[in-house]
Amino acid sequence: MAGMSPDSGSAFSGGGSNAAFKKQLNKVYAWYVGGFISFVVVLAIAEQMGLTRQYIGYAFLAATVLLYAGIGFMSRTNDAAEYYVAGRRVPAMYNGMATGADWMSAASFIGMAGTLYLTGYSGLAFIMGWTGGYCLVALFLAPYLRKFGQFTIPDFLGARYDGNFPRCSCCDLVFVCLRCCPDLRCRFDHNTFDRRFI
Amino acid sequence: MQLTESHRQYWAKNLRITAILLGLWFVVTYVVAFMARDLNFSFFGWPFSFWMGAQGSLIAYVLIIVYYAHYMNNLDKEHGCAEEEED
Protein backbone atom coordinates (compact mmCIF):
# COMPACT_ATOMS: atom_id res chain seq x y z
CA MET A 1 0.00 0.00 0.00
CA ALA A 2 1.24 3.47 -0.85
CA GLY A 3 2.85 5.17 2.16
CA MET A 4 1.57 5.13 5.72
CA SER A 5 2.11 8.77 6.71
CA PRO A 6 -1.16 10.52 7.52
CA ASP A 7 -0.86 13.41 5.08
CA SER A 8 0.11 11.65 1.88
CA GLY A 9 -0.94 8.14 2.76
CA SER A 10 -3.94 8.04 0.45
CA ALA A 11 -3.93 5.46 -2.27
CA PHE A 12 -5.69 8.05 -4.39
CA SER A 13 -3.75 11.23 -3.70
CA GLY A 14 -0.12 10.55 -4.58
CA GLY A 15 0.18 14.05 -6.04
CA GLY A 16 0.68 12.68 -9.54
CA SER A 17 -0.85 13.85 -12.79
CA ASN A 18 -4.41 13.28 -13.88
CA ALA A 19 -3.31 10.42 -16.13
CA ALA A 20 -1.62 8.62 -13.23
CA PHE A 21 -4.71 9.18 -11.10
CA LYS A 22 -6.93 7.73 -13.82
CA LYS A 23 -4.68 4.70 -14.18
CA GLN A 24 -4.83 4.14 -10.43
CA LEU A 25 -8.61 4.51 -10.54
CA ASN A 26 -8.90 1.95 -13.34
CA LYS A 27 -6.82 -0.47 -11.31
CA VAL A 28 -9.00 -0.01 -8.22
CA TYR A 29 -12.17 -0.51 -10.25
CA ALA A 30 -10.78 -3.65 -11.88
CA TRP A 31 -9.89 -5.09 -8.46
CA TYR A 32 -13.29 -4.16 -7.13
CA VAL A 33 -15.20 -5.80 -9.98
CA GLY A 34 -13.02 -8.91 -9.79
CA GLY A 35 -13.44 -9.09 -6.03
CA PHE A 36 -17.20 -8.66 -6.24
CA ILE A 37 -17.58 -11.40 -8.85
CA SER A 38 -15.43 -13.84 -6.89
CA PHE A 39 -17.34 -12.97 -3.69
CA VAL A 40 -20.64 -13.83 -5.38
CA VAL A 41 -19.17 -17.04 -6.79
CA VAL A 42 -17.87 -18.06 -3.36
CA LEU A 43 -21.27 -17.38 -1.82
CA ALA A 44 -23.00 -19.38 -4.57
CA ILE A 45 -20.71 -22.32 -3.87
CA ALA A 46 -21.33 -21.96 -0.14
CA GLU A 47 -25.07 -21.90 -0.77
CA GLN A 48 -24.85 -25.12 -2.75
CA MET A 49 -22.98 -26.61 0.20
CA GLY A 50 -25.78 -25.67 2.55
CA LEU A 51 -25.25 -22.11 3.81
CA THR A 52 -28.61 -20.77 4.93
CA ARG A 53 -30.20 -17.70 3.47
CA GLN A 54 -29.84 -15.83 6.74
CA TYR A 55 -26.07 -16.25 6.81
CA ILE A 56 -25.80 -15.17 3.18
CA GLY A 57 -27.53 -11.96 4.24
CA TYR A 58 -25.07 -11.51 7.12
CA ALA A 59 -22.12 -12.19 4.82
CA PHE A 60 -23.28 -9.52 2.38
CA LEU A 61 -23.83 -7.02 5.18
CA ALA A 62 -20.45 -7.67 6.79
CA ALA A 63 -18.62 -7.60 3.46
CA THR A 64 -20.23 -4.29 2.52
CA VAL A 65 -19.36 -2.61 5.83
CA LEU A 66 -15.79 -3.95 5.74
CA LEU A 67 -15.38 -2.82 2.15
CA TYR A 68 -16.52 0.72 2.98
CA ALA A 69 -14.20 0.79 5.96
CA GLY A 70 -11.34 -0.42 3.76
CA ILE A 71 -12.02 2.23 1.13
CA GLY A 72 -12.18 4.89 3.83
CA PHE A 73 -8.90 3.67 5.28
CA MET A 74 -7.16 3.56 1.92
CA SER A 75 -8.26 7.04 0.88
CA ARG A 76 -7.77 8.84 4.18
CA THR A 77 -6.50 12.38 3.82
CA ASN A 78 -6.06 15.69 5.59
CA ASP A 79 -6.81 17.86 2.60
CA ALA A 80 -10.34 19.25 2.38
CA ALA A 81 -10.45 19.16 -1.42
CA GLU A 82 -9.25 15.55 -1.38
CA TYR A 83 -11.77 14.66 1.29
CA TYR A 84 -14.88 16.14 -0.27
CA VAL A 85 -14.30 15.91 -4.01
CA ALA A 86 -11.23 13.63 -4.44
CA GLY A 87 -9.15 16.61 -5.52
CA ARG A 88 -11.67 17.35 -8.34
CA ARG A 89 -9.84 14.86 -10.51
CA VAL A 90 -12.36 12.06 -10.94
CA PRO A 91 -13.13 11.73 -14.68
CA ALA A 92 -16.65 12.53 -15.85
CA MET A 93 -17.40 8.92 -16.76
CA TYR A 94 -16.65 7.71 -13.22
CA ASN A 95 -18.68 10.49 -11.67
CA GLY A 96 -21.51 9.50 -13.99
CA MET A 97 -21.27 5.88 -12.87
CA ALA A 98 -21.42 6.96 -9.22
CA THR A 99 -24.49 9.11 -9.92
CA GLY A 100 -26.11 6.22 -11.76
CA ALA A 101 -25.41 3.89 -8.87
CA ASP A 102 -27.12 6.31 -6.50
CA TRP A 103 -30.11 6.56 -8.79
CA MET A 104 -30.46 2.78 -9.03
CA SER A 105 -30.72 2.31 -5.30
CA ALA A 106 -32.89 -0.16 -3.44
CA ALA A 107 -35.58 2.52 -3.26
CA SER A 108 -35.71 2.73 -7.04
CA PHE A 109 -36.12 -0.98 -7.55
CA ILE A 110 -38.13 -2.24 -4.61
CA GLY A 111 -39.73 0.91 -3.28
CA MET A 112 -40.85 2.26 -6.64
CA ALA A 113 -42.42 -1.02 -7.72
CA GLY A 114 -44.61 -0.92 -4.63
CA THR A 115 -45.33 2.78 -4.91
CA LEU A 116 -46.45 2.50 -8.52
CA TYR A 117 -48.56 -0.54 -7.71
CA LEU A 118 -50.28 1.38 -4.94
CA THR A 119 -50.70 4.81 -6.48
CA GLY A 120 -50.59 4.35 -10.26
CA TYR A 121 -49.91 7.46 -12.32
CA SER A 122 -49.37 9.71 -9.30
CA GLY A 123 -46.46 7.56 -8.15
CA LEU A 124 -44.57 8.54 -11.29
CA ALA A 125 -44.06 11.94 -9.65
CA PHE A 126 -41.23 10.33 -7.66
CA ILE A 127 -39.49 9.05 -10.78
CA MET A 128 -39.89 12.32 -12.68
CA GLY A 129 -38.90 14.31 -9.61
CA TRP A 130 -35.66 12.61 -8.80
CA THR A 131 -34.57 12.33 -12.42
CA GLY A 132 -35.78 15.76 -13.50
CA GLY A 133 -33.95 17.19 -10.51
CA TYR A 134 -30.68 16.27 -12.21
CA CYS A 135 -31.59 18.70 -15.00
CA LEU A 136 -31.99 21.56 -12.54
CA VAL A 137 -28.72 20.63 -10.84
CA ALA A 138 -26.90 20.40 -14.17
CA LEU A 139 -28.27 23.70 -15.48
CA PHE A 140 -28.19 25.85 -12.36
CA LEU A 141 -25.85 24.47 -9.72
CA ALA A 142 -23.19 22.02 -10.84
CA PRO A 143 -21.13 24.18 -13.24
CA TYR A 144 -21.08 27.16 -10.86
CA LEU A 145 -20.44 25.04 -7.80
CA ARG A 146 -17.29 23.84 -9.51
CA LYS A 147 -16.23 27.26 -10.74
CA PHE A 148 -16.75 28.79 -7.30
CA GLY A 149 -14.60 26.05 -5.80
CA GLN A 150 -17.12 25.17 -3.10
CA PHE A 151 -17.94 21.72 -1.77
CA THR A 152 -21.59 21.90 -0.76
CA ILE A 153 -24.64 23.71 -2.08
CA PRO A 154 -25.12 25.74 1.16
CA ASP A 155 -21.47 26.88 0.89
CA PHE A 156 -22.02 27.86 -2.72
CA LEU A 157 -25.23 29.79 -2.04
CA GLY A 158 -23.57 31.53 0.90
CA ALA A 159 -20.64 32.61 -1.30
CA ARG A 160 -22.79 33.52 -4.27
CA TYR A 161 -25.49 35.52 -2.48
CA ASP A 162 -23.21 36.67 0.28
CA GLY A 163 -24.94 35.97 3.54
CA ASN A 164 -26.12 33.46 6.04
CA PHE A 165 -29.81 33.57 5.16
CA PRO A 166 -29.54 31.69 1.82
CA ARG A 167 -27.13 29.35 3.48
CA CYS A 168 -29.51 28.56 6.34
CA SER A 169 -32.54 28.15 4.11
CA CYS A 170 -30.58 25.73 1.96
CA CYS A 171 -29.54 23.80 5.08
CA ASP A 172 -33.20 23.56 6.04
CA LEU A 173 -34.04 22.14 2.64
CA VAL A 174 -31.23 19.61 2.81
CA PHE A 175 -32.38 18.60 6.26
CA VAL A 176 -35.95 18.10 5.06
CA CYS A 177 -34.74 15.99 2.14
CA LEU A 178 -32.46 13.89 4.31
CA ARG A 179 -35.22 13.44 6.83
CA CYS A 180 -37.94 12.50 4.35
CA CYS A 181 -35.89 10.33 2.03
CA PRO A 182 -34.93 7.64 4.59
CA ASP A 183 -38.48 7.74 5.93
CA LEU A 184 -39.88 6.99 2.52
CA ARG A 185 -37.31 4.34 1.88
CA CYS A 186 -37.81 2.67 5.24
CA ARG A 187 -41.49 2.42 4.51
CA PHE A 188 -41.01 0.85 1.14
CA ASP A 189 -37.99 -1.37 1.49
CA HIS A 190 -37.73 -2.61 5.01
CA ASN A 191 -36.56 -5.97 3.77
CA THR A 192 -33.29 -4.64 2.40
CA PHE A 193 -30.26 -3.63 4.37
CA ASP A 194 -28.90 -1.20 1.85
CA ARG A 195 -30.38 1.95 3.34
CA ARG A 196 -28.15 4.75 2.26
CA PHE A 197 -28.53 8.42 2.95
CA ILE A 198 -27.58 9.85 -0.42
CA MET B 1 -11.71 41.17 -13.32
CA GLN B 2 -12.47 43.21 -16.44
CA LEU B 3 -15.13 41.58 -18.60
CA THR B 4 -14.20 41.34 -22.24
CA GLU B 5 -16.52 41.10 -25.24
CA SER B 6 -15.73 37.37 -25.41
CA HIS B 7 -16.90 36.94 -21.79
CA ARG B 8 -20.16 38.74 -22.53
CA GLN B 9 -20.84 36.58 -25.57
CA TYR B 10 -20.05 33.49 -23.55
CA TRP B 11 -22.49 34.47 -20.82
CA ALA B 12 -25.22 35.42 -23.31
CA LYS B 13 -24.90 32.05 -25.03
CA ASN B 14 -24.87 30.30 -21.68
CA LEU B 15 -28.11 32.03 -20.64
CA ARG B 16 -29.73 31.24 -23.98
CA ILE B 17 -28.95 27.52 -23.92
CA THR B 18 -30.03 27.32 -20.27
CA ALA B 19 -33.35 28.99 -21.07
CA ILE B 20 -34.01 26.75 -24.08
CA LEU B 21 -33.20 23.54 -22.21
CA LEU B 22 -35.19 24.67 -19.19
CA GLY B 23 -38.16 25.29 -21.49
CA LEU B 24 -37.84 21.76 -22.85
CA TRP B 25 -37.61 20.46 -19.30
CA PHE B 26 -40.77 22.34 -18.35
CA VAL B 27 -42.69 20.93 -21.32
CA VAL B 28 -41.79 17.29 -20.70
CA THR B 29 -42.37 17.64 -16.95
CA TYR B 30 -45.25 19.97 -16.21
CA VAL B 31 -47.11 20.39 -19.49
CA VAL B 32 -47.30 16.64 -20.11
CA ALA B 33 -48.34 15.95 -16.52
CA PHE B 34 -50.92 18.74 -16.57
CA MET B 35 -52.46 17.53 -19.86
CA ALA B 36 -52.21 13.86 -18.84
CA ARG B 37 -55.90 13.09 -19.33
CA ASP B 38 -55.98 14.59 -22.84
CA LEU B 39 -52.81 12.82 -23.95
CA ASN B 40 -54.17 9.38 -23.23
CA PHE B 41 -53.72 7.90 -26.72
CA SER B 42 -51.97 4.59 -27.05
CA PHE B 43 -48.21 4.71 -27.56
CA PHE B 44 -46.44 1.35 -28.07
CA GLY B 45 -49.37 -0.14 -26.19
CA TRP B 46 -49.15 2.26 -23.23
CA PRO B 47 -51.21 5.36 -22.53
CA PHE B 48 -48.92 8.15 -23.75
CA SER B 49 -48.97 10.21 -20.57
CA PHE B 50 -48.08 7.19 -18.45
CA TRP B 51 -45.25 6.25 -20.80
CA MET B 52 -43.94 9.81 -20.67
CA GLY B 53 -43.87 9.74 -16.88
CA ALA B 54 -42.20 6.36 -16.66
CA GLN B 55 -39.74 6.58 -19.56
CA GLY B 56 -40.19 9.36 -22.09
CA SER B 57 -39.43 12.31 -19.85
CA LEU B 58 -36.50 10.48 -18.25
CA ILE B 59 -34.98 9.95 -21.70
CA ALA B 60 -35.57 13.63 -22.42
CA TYR B 61 -33.83 14.60 -19.15
CA VAL B 62 -30.77 12.55 -19.98
CA LEU B 63 -30.63 14.02 -23.49
CA ILE B 64 -30.96 17.53 -22.05
CA ILE B 65 -28.02 16.95 -19.72
CA VAL B 66 -25.88 15.30 -22.42
CA TYR B 67 -26.57 18.14 -24.85
CA TYR B 68 -25.86 20.80 -22.21
CA ALA B 69 -22.55 19.21 -21.22
CA HIS B 70 -21.49 18.84 -24.86
CA TYR B 71 -22.52 22.38 -25.76
CA MET B 72 -20.83 23.94 -22.74
CA ASN B 73 -17.61 21.99 -23.32
CA ASN B 74 -17.43 23.36 -26.85
CA LEU B 75 -18.31 26.86 -25.65
CA ASP B 76 -15.56 26.70 -23.00
CA LYS B 77 -13.03 25.71 -25.64
CA GLU B 78 -14.23 28.35 -28.08
CA HIS B 79 -13.87 31.14 -25.54
CA GLY B 80 -10.67 29.84 -24.01
CA CYS B 81 -11.95 29.14 -20.52
CA ALA B 82 -11.80 25.34 -20.61
CA GLU B 83 -10.09 23.55 -17.77
CA GLU B 84 -6.69 22.33 -18.83
CA GLU B 85 -6.51 18.54 -19.06
CA GLU B 86 -3.08 17.10 -18.49
CA ASP B 87 -3.52 13.65 -19.98
Image (cartoon, coloured by chain):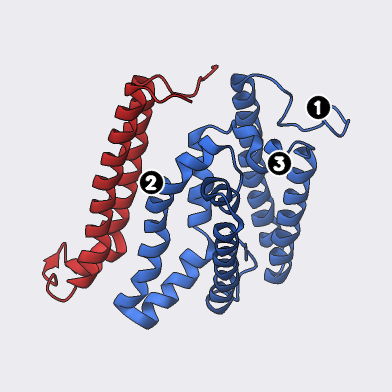
Tag 1–tag 3 contact (CB < 8 Å): no
Name the mark on residue A176.
none
The N terminus of chain A lies in which quarter of the figure? top right
Q: Amino acid at mark 1?
A: Ala
Which residue lies under the disc numbered 3? A83
* Visual hue assigned to chain A: blue
Q: Nearer the viewer, mark 1 or mark 3?
A: 3
What chain does badge 1 belong to? A
Q: Secondary structure at mark 2?
A: helix
Question: What amino acid does circle 3 point to?
Answer: Tyr
Q: Would you place residue A19 above or below residue A105 in this image?
A: above
Q: Residue at x 65, y 40 (%)?
A: A32
CA neighbours of label 3 inside 10 A, class few (<14), some (14 to 19), many (20+): few
Q: Chain of mark 3?
A: A
- In this rendering, position of residue A174 left or right of residue B68: right
Disc 1 is placed on an element classified as: loop
Q: Which mark, by number, is residue A139? A: 2
Mark 1 or 2: in front is 2
Q: Work out whether residue A103 can be spotted.
A: yes
Q: Which residue is mark 1?
A: A2
- Find residue A112 and report its horizontal and vertical position in percent: 44, 70
The chain that hosts pointer 2 is: A
